[in-house]
Image (spheres, rainbow, N blue to C red):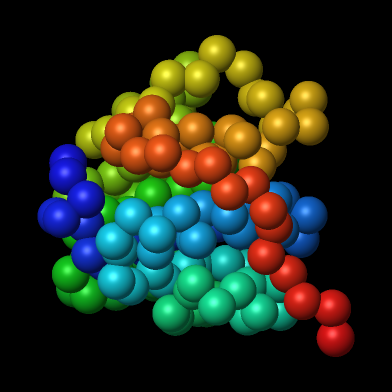
Amino acid sequence: MGKDTIKKVLIFDLNCLGDMLMSSPVMRALKENGVEQVDVVVWRPCREVVECNSYIDNIYCSNVWWEAIKARFRGYDMVMQLNMSLKTNLLLWIAGKRRLGYSYWVKGLPLTMKVAIPYRTATRGYRIRECLDLLEKGLGWECKDERMIYEVK
């Protein structure tokens, strides 16, 4: 899938606060590669972490199943997740036709674009690179800027 065909992306980032910060460079990389609209679905307690990310256009944090259903009608070019949950991959299956995520054991079955990963690199302290590798390996993009995006209030 070329850069010109991906203009509107929805990310299911259903993680804890620290993981949310470490996945923040993905939103920058999407915008730098021509994506015009980047929306995210997060848990309500994590909303403040992503509100300061200027690369995010819309934040949804109501019932995640309901957000997946609504996403189907919002016309996203691609939906993706930044963890390896089978439950979240099922949400992606509901949310969109093009689904990018990790193929880790059988958890990647609902995905249309899969990035094989042999083990959780995030458990070894490489979460930022793991998230950016999803774009590099899944879409063929170059994502060098690993700086996290956060604001201290």
Report the residue at 35% width, 39% height from top: 141
Report the residue at 33% width, 73% height from top: 37
Q: Is residue 101 visible?
A: no
Report the quarter where the N terminus lies: top left
* Quadrant of res 74: bottom left
Q: Is residue 102 visible?
A: yes
Decide: is 38 above or below 18.
below
Residue 58 x, y percent position in the rendering: 44, 80
* Quadrant of res 30: bottom left
Residue 119 x, y percent position in the rendering: 62, 17
Which residue is farthest top? Answer: 118
Report the quarter where the C terminus lies: bottom right
Q: For this view, does 47 lie left or right of residue 87?
A: right
Q: Which of 139 and 18 lies nearest the eye of the viewer? A: 139
Which residue is farthest bottom? Answer: 153
Residue 93 x, y percent position in the rendering: 29, 48
Decide: is 52 above or below 46.
below
Decide: is 85 above or below 32.
above
Q: For this view, does 100 lie left or right of residue 122?
A: left
Q: Which of 105 and 78 lies nearest the eye of the viewer? A: 78
Decide: is 130 above or below 92.
above
Residue 56 x, y percent position in the rendering: 49, 74
Q: Which of 64 and 96 lies nearest the eye of the viewer? A: 96
Report the residue at 30% width, 63% height from top: 35
